[in-house]
Image (cartoon, rainbow, N blue to C red):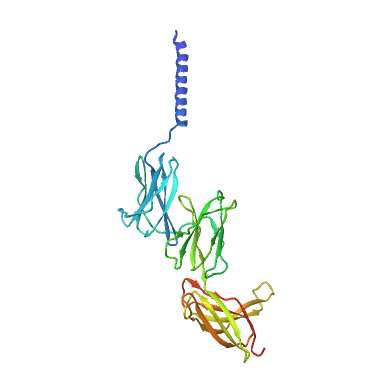
């Protein structure tokens, strides 16, 4: 065989071998088996909201059920840790987050995880407080305070794509809003197709801050909503046939001694120049004052005798002695006639 005949055969053999190697490499890439072993761990940032802090990070279980928690403390010895949580077997990286109590500026923290193949620790990080971004929640703010012992409904919308059918819980921090947020017991609510949701609070006894949270491994939180609770006030009147005198009396719940009671007349006034309408509006003007006195364990009482010079619709307004868990409250209206009628 001549040299000229051998050369094409060698070229053809080389090309076939190259194609075979390329095909093998492509096939190996397509059927590549995911790595299994000890989890992959990454320590993230810290989300701060009110008195609550949440430590963030990511975990890849790498094929086995994996447990994880955060360690934190004033030094790299840590000393505190969050509650242990579990991720199912898988090979995807999962965002996680857990609440930490007592995390102070300068504290060290890290994420740790383990499975049947071993344990891994995330990088040590130091907490430096900063403002956090609120999740895409829109909460409807109540127009007025809720009467002590009354009920209310908190409504809102979770905006953005993929927010239909999301499970949410309501969390609270009562006045003076210094405690960490705690989830209110009860079944979580589910958002509608439009992301709308609502929570019913059957009995409000103190001004409270609320927030809504998702049930994801890394929760999303709404902005804080402060709902004020107002004193419950009743007002009654007993008129006299002599001299136009009237006895004004009532109760304030819960009991508070020495609180100021303002007996106010509802007067019609014309709107100011800034008003866009010519309709009459109203305002309350104080005609008499008194203070609450001891009644029972649950309520206080007030009473006074007054000569009514201006007839009309009256209400009683209680102002607390000092700023506290409850705000000023108003009674319903009663009709009084002026002296001589």
Q: Nearer the viewer, residue 338 or 164?
A: 338
Residue 149 in picture, x, y percent from top left: 52, 69
Residue drawn 43% across and 35% down?
A: 34
Spot the residue most to the right: 278
Instruction: Look at the picture and state if 285 lies above or below 175.
Output: below
**Direction left: furthest residue:** 77
Q: Nearer the viewer, residue 126 or 6?
A: 126
Q: Is residue 81 in view?
A: yes
Q: From this viewpoint, which residue is outermost toward the front?
A: 296
Residue 267 position, x and y percent, is: 63, 80
Q: In this view, does 291 lie above or below 212?
A: below
Q: Quadrant of residue 41?
A: top left
- Please provide percent x and percent y for residue 136: 53, 55
Q: Looking at the picture, how far across and down is residue 261, in whole percent?
A: 53, 81
Residue drawn at 45 percent across, 26 percent down? 24
- Position above or below: 262 against 76: below
Quadrant of the frame with the N terminus? top left
269 vs 147, left or right, is right
Q: Residue furthest top?
A: 1
**Marker count (numbered):** 0
85 or 177, which lies in front? Answer: 85
Report the side of 312 relative to 317 (left or right). right
Q: Quadrant of the C terminus?
A: bottom right
Residue 271 visible in this rendered orientation of the protein: no
């Amino acid at each position: 065989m001549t040299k000229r005949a051998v050369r094409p055969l060698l070229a053809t053999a080389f090309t076939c071998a190259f194609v075979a190697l390329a095909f093998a490499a492509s096939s190996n890439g397509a059927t590549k088996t995911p790595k299994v072993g000890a989890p992959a761990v990454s320590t993230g940032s810290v989300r701060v909201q009110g008195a609550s802090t949440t430590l963030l990070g990511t975990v890849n279980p790498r094929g086995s059920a994996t447990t994880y928690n955060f360690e934190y403390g004033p030094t790299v010895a840590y000393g505190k840790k969050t509650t242990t949580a579990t991720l199912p077997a898988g090979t995807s990286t999962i965002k996680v987050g857990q609440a930490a109590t007592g995390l102070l500026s300068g504290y060290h923290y890290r994420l740790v995880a383990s499975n049947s193949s071993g344990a891994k620790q995330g990088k040590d990080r130091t907490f430096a407080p900063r403002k956090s971004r609120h999740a895409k929640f829109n909460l409807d703010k109540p127009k007025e305070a809720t009467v002590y012992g009354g009920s209310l409904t908190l409504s809102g919308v979770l905006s953005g794509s993929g927010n239909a059918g999301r499970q949410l819980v309501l969390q609270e921090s009562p006045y003076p809003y210094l405690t960490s947020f705690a989830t209110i017991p009860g079944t979580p609510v589910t958002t509608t197709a439009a992301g709308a949701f609502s929570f019913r609070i059957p009995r409000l006894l103190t001004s409270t801050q609320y927030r809504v949270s998702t049930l994801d491994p890394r929760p999303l939180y709404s902005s804080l909503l402060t709902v004020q609770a107002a004193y419950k006030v009743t007002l009654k009147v007993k008129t006299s046939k002599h001299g136009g005198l009237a006895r004004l009396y009532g109760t304030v719940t819960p009991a508070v001694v020495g609180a100021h009671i303002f007996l106010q007349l509802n007067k019609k006034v014309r709107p100011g120049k800034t008003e866009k309408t010519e309709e009459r509006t109203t305002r309350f003007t104080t005609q008499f004052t008194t203070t609450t006195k001891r009644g029972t364990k649950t309520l206080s009482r007030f009473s006074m005798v007054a000569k009514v010079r201006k007839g009309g619709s009256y209400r009683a307004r209680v102002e607390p002695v000092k700023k506290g868990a409850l705000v000023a409250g108003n009674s319903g209206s009663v009709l009084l006639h002026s002296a001589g009628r």
